[in-house]
Amino acid sequence: MPRHSATDIQPHLLALVEELTPGERLPPERELAARLGCSRQTLRACLSGLEHDGRIWRHVGQGTFRGARPRHLPVRDTLLIEGATPPDVLAARLLLEPMVAAAAARLAEPADVAHLRAKVAAGRKARDRAACEQADDAFHRALAQISGNPILVGFLNYLSGVRRRVAWQREWEATYRRIGTEAFQTLHSDQHGRIVDAVEARDPGAAASFMTEHLETIRTDMTGGR
């Protein structure tokens, strides 16, 4: 079935928003994209336009709501996200996620390791860009959850929100056109697997090192070796 463009879906999305009461939350992006027959990237571009016009407002981790942003809510997080470039995101991940992997290696129980291996297996089965990105995000967030530290989990959720923004999605789309999903199903998933091996071995140093290697691979993929 052909995917509709932003021009096609804009009036339908606006009509859907106007059916809601002010302050009511919109359905999740996946559901909206399916209902409108478009990609999530196209949907996000349209949502950004509606947000700019004050018809909706978004809060990372909570959802998208009809109406203008309430005055009592800070805009700082939104401004930070909108201003973040893909290199900014990767630099932050390289600082944070090796420590997250090391913490997981110190704290993981057998059930946690089994959960991580299931996430790796899901990544190997991903068949398109959206599925690959979803599987990757699920793996990294699962690592953070092992720590039991809500601050670490919150940071990873925050970075996950940044990765859903248009700038990252545009860069990631170009990356997947260049390297294909096979790179995620093989090399990236192999790297995830090595991180899990280190977690299972309770080797924080190896877990951190393998995570750094993995993120450096992503940076190389996104920059094309520049």
Image (cartoon, helix red, strand yellow):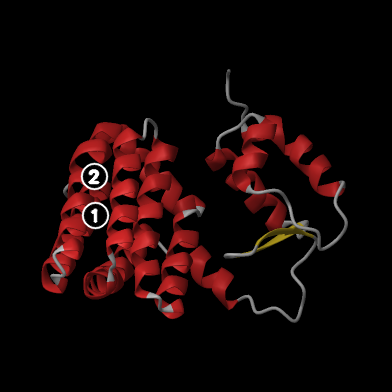
Expressed as whole percent of the image width and height from the top left, the position of residue 113 reads 27, 58
Above-or-below relation of 214 to 12: below
Residue 2's disc is: none
Question: Percent x, y for residue 208?
Answer: 18, 69
Residue situated in front as seen by the camera: 153 or 42: 153
Give the vertical position of 224 relative to 195 (above or below).
Answer: above
Q: Residue at x 38, y 60 (%)?
A: 142
The reply to whether residue 224 is visible in this rendering is no
Residue 195, image x, y percentages: 19, 58
State which quarter of the image contains the N terminus.
top right
Give the CA distance from mark 2 to mark 1. 16 Å
N-terminal of the pair, mark 2 or mark 1, is 2
**Residue beneath the point at 23% across and 52% down:** 192
In the rendered image, which quarter is residue 207 located in?
A: bottom left
* Left or right relative to 201: residue 20: right
Left/right of residue 149 with respect to residue 29 in the rendered view? left
Residue at left offset 42%, top offset 38%: 131
| Residue type highlighted by circle 2 | Ser
Across and down, in percent, residue 47 comes to 66, 49
In this rendering, is residue 194 above or below 128? below
| Residue at screen point 13% across, 64% down | 201
Residue to which mark 1 is pinned: 219
Instruction: State the mark number for residue 189.
Output: 2
Q: Can see residue 87?
A: yes
Could you tell me which secondary element the residue under label 2 belongs to?
helix
Q: Quadrant of residue 214?
A: bottom left
Q: Nearer the viewer, residue 192 or 47?
A: 192
